[in-house]
Image (tube, helix red, strand yellow):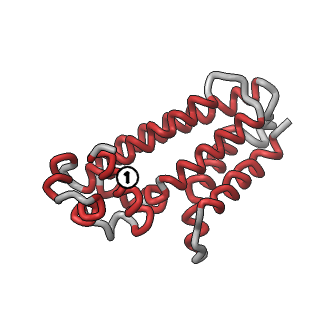
Amino acid sequence: MDTKELILQTAINLFNQHGTARISTNTIAEKTGISSGNLYYHYKDKSHIIREIYERMMNSWEKSYGRAENRSISIETLKRFIEDNFELLWEYRFFYRETVALLNTDPALLERHTAVIKQRFERQRAILQQAEKEGLIRFPEPAVRLDEVLTIVWIVANNYLLHLESLGQAVDYHDFENGSELILKILHPYLV
């Protein structure tokens, strides 16, 4: 593993365990086994590291979308897409714990994230529209609209970790399997 990748992986692990506020670039360098100068050669500050992690996270998400977009949608395809998303929510959980704080402190990250979220919402809408077109799912308009269900799914998925931790629960990977099942329960009334 090259130094840049090692720095990012170390930072992700530390941020997931302790949060971004409690971890300095010096701590990341120490845990990576490099000097602070070596870290600064690759990343100018902690915000730069977080933005690079964000880009890595978005690239990982592309694989999940690639398996679901522009193809026939089955219940298994939909289920795998949801599971992929929860795996990534777990892998980058620090970001979902701290989204608002991270976006408020970094205007460049806020601008990038806003554009990505709008695009991802549209892409998820297209996946559900494809499932609807193929007769897998049906939203009885005007009582229930696809965008409303998608918004509920989005809120639950992106805030599931915060919900569990706010109850004082120590969260592990298996809790995220329950989150995937919860999303399927939200969609269940609309499955044909």
* Residue position marked by numbered label 1 in the rendering: 9
Nearer to the camera, 34 or 15: 34
In this orientation, does residue 141 appear?
no
Q: Position of residue 17 (x, y in %)?
A: 43, 67
Foreground residue, 12 or 105? Answer: 12
Residue 119: percent from left, percent from top:
49, 34
Residue type at tag 1: Gln
Quadrant of the image containing the C terminus: top right
Query: Is residue 39 at least partly visible in the picture?
Result: yes
Direction from residue 117 to residue 2 in the image, left or right:
left
Residue at the far left: name it: 37
Q: Is residue 55 left or right of residue 36?
A: right
Residue 105 versus residue 129 in the image, above or below: below
Q: Residue 147: image x %, image y %?
A: 65, 39
- Farthest residue to the bottom: give it: 168
- The quadrant of the image that shows the N terminus is top left
Judged from the image, the secondary structure of the residue bearing numbered disc 1 is helix
